[in-house]
Image (spheres, rainbow, N blue to C red):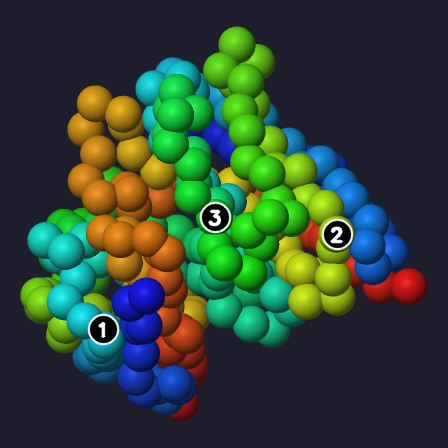
Amino acid sequence: EIVLTQSPGTLSLSPGERATLSCRASQSVSISYLAWYQQKPGQAPRLLIYGASSRATGIPDRFSGSGSGTDFTLTISRLEPEDFAVYYCQQYGSSPLTFGGGTKVEIQ
Amino acid sequence: EVQLVESGGGLVQPGGSLRLSCAASGFTFSSYNMKWVRQAPGKGLEWVSYISSSSSTIYYADSVKGRFTISRDNAKNSLYLQVNSLRAEDTAVYYCARACSSTSCYGFGYMDVWGKGTTVTVSS
């Protein structure tokens, strides 16, 4: 099983600042089959990034993903008020499919 | 509009059963692999099960294997999850999610469409 460890657990930032979220895998993720999701309270997750670096349809370009192998990063270049939420990484290359524990981006 | 709508959740006693349903619309359901994902109160996301478009390939998380059964009816554009022998730790919001097209699938597919979820509470 591929264990995904996200850090930090909580990120306290102000609107306009840059957010850098990390996702580290216990073993290499097949062909960068890694996705990032955003979840707001009471809502379903929303796909942001797939294939480690491809933005999903309708996702603003302030969201970017990078990385390969075991180290992946989600960057939000300039935080907008609507970006404060919990972010999860997920690998979909091998079963069992696994999620990271999440990073909460909160308003400082 | 592409949409997934779950139903069938509720309050059930330990050891009980439920059948969760997910109605799909706005896309060719029979061409897509599908998944169930759950989220316990205040916790993170947990993948539960995967089914291919033709039902030929099915996977389960170890935590539900032998107790949960995923199925689909492409004629009815519906996905199901039969949940048996429920435990307190199965209490969660259960989401169905679209995985990937059977003709263009990378790995098990990222989840680009999600339902709003149905809540299962296991308690005596």
Mark 2 lies on a secondary structure that is: loop
Cα–Cα span, label 1 and label 2: 32 Å
Q: CA distance from mark 1 to mark 3?
A: 21 Å
Residue appearing at x 10%, y 53% in the figure:
A31
Please check whether the numbered discs 1 and 3 fall on a single chain.
no
In screen coordinates, is A60 left or right of A32?
Answer: right
Q: Nearer the viewer, residue B83 or A17?
A: B83
Return the chain for callout 3: B
- Report how far apart the C-alphas of labels 3 and 2 lie in the structure: 15 Å
Residue name at image x 39 percent, y 51 percent: A46
Circle 2 marks a residue in which chain? B
Q: Indicate left or right for B104 with B43 as reference.
A: left
1 or 2: mark nearer the eye: 2
Quadrant containing the N terminus of chain A is bottom left
Residue A29, horizontal then vertical, whole percent: 17, 62
Q: Amino acid at mark 1?
A: Ala
Q: Which residue is mark 1?
A: A25
Give how far across and how far down residue B52 sits, in percent: 37, 30
Please name the amino acid that badge 2 sits on.
Ser
Location of mark 2 (residue): B85
Q: Tag on residue A44? A: none
- The residue located at (47%, 48%) in the rendering is B60
Q: Are marks 1 and 3 in contact (CB under 8 Å)?
A: no
Most distant residue in the right direction: B124
Residue pointed to by mark 3: B60
